[in-house]
Amino acid sequence: MERRWVPDGPLDVGLALAPHRRGTGDPTWRMGGDGAVWRTCRTPDGPGTLRVSVEASTVCGHAWGPGAGWLLETLPTLLGADDDISGFSVHHQVLADVARKHAGLRIGRTGRVMEALVPAVLEQKVVGREAWRAWRWLLARYGEPAPGPAPEGMRVFPEPEVWREIPSWHWHRAGAEAVRARTIATAAWHAAKLEAAATTEELDRLLRALPGVGVWTSAEARQRAFGDPDAVSVGDFHLAKIVGYALTGEKTDDPGMLRLLAPYEGHRHRATVLIALTGLRPPPRGPRMPVRDYRSF
């Protein structure tokens, strides 16, 4: 199935789709040699594969599998067609140039909560490489092959009941300890209620009622599933330091970050995305957080 869509304003497709990639080798996300992005999804209608490319000012979507129709119907939403940037303005000079350069930045929404939540839980309190290794292992073991002519190795996110039934030794093989495994399994029991949330506020309440899900995890999930432009990843290991350094030249903590982002109320996540695009980072000091590996083979 195919759909062609012309956005009503500037759109950077790469920036819109990048947040859904979980590290190099993500089995659900690929960049083709021709610049097209491939993405798999567990839609309400079943598994599907989506290929997104751009020809001049037209977005071209091709989809395969039982979820193909749903993927093409929601393609504009995925790319940020519903992203309302009214009320957003730059309050720090350092962001002025990057905001102009990336005028096509849009925060899209997948509408799929579990697909955003599971990798966010895997990324709790560990370095990205450790979380992405677990994600790749679990998808390779439990994900379905991607429908259609997808790049080799692509997989589709498993059903909730699959996440509930993964044995402890396979979580261990993946490199995810019992706490994160239990959080994901618990969320899978409530998947239907999570997917039915109507607003980002309702989803935040439901997520934070789950054991093991806090402010950071909820924000990470809502940014992707609901395209929430104000969901700040409070508690992130790096974000507060980056925001502080970019806006003031000094690192700060979470309360300091929230004070700096106060002028962007309603668009605080959007502001942090722009801050990341400046490339400004505090000078590294001290050893990096190590990648743990306690798997048994």
Image (tube, helix red, strand yellow):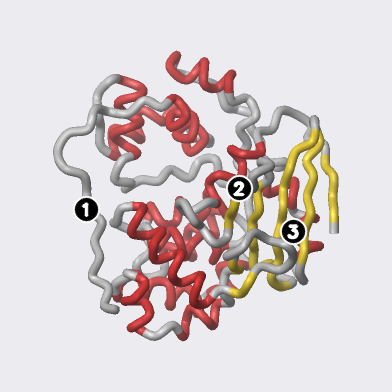
- For residue 31, which numbered disc appears in the image? 2
- Residue wearing tag 3: 71
- Position of residue 169 measured from the top left corner of the image (x, y, whole percent): 33, 83
Q: In the picture, which quadrant includes the N terminus?
A: bottom right
Q: Quadrant of residue 107?
A: top right
255 on left or right of 117: left
Q: Earlier in the sequence, mark 2 or mark 1?
A: 2
Tell me what residue is drawn at x 41 percent, y 69 percent: 210
In percent of width and height, residue 9 lies at: 75, 29
Q: Amino acid at mark 2?
A: Met
Instruction: Measure the alpha-carbon separation of dots 3 and 2.
Output: 18 Å
Q: Amino acid at mark 3?
A: Leu
| Residue displayed at 69% across by 42% down | 34
Residue 290 marker: 1
> Is disc 2 placed on a helix, strand or loop?
strand
Residue in the foreground of this view, choosing between 252 and 287: 287
**Label 3 vs label 1, nearer the camera:** 1
Q: Is residue 145 above or below residue 248?
A: below
Tell me the tag on residue 269: none
User: What's the distance in space between the residues labelled 2 and 1, CA to CA?
Assistant: 28 Å
- Quadrant of res 102: top right
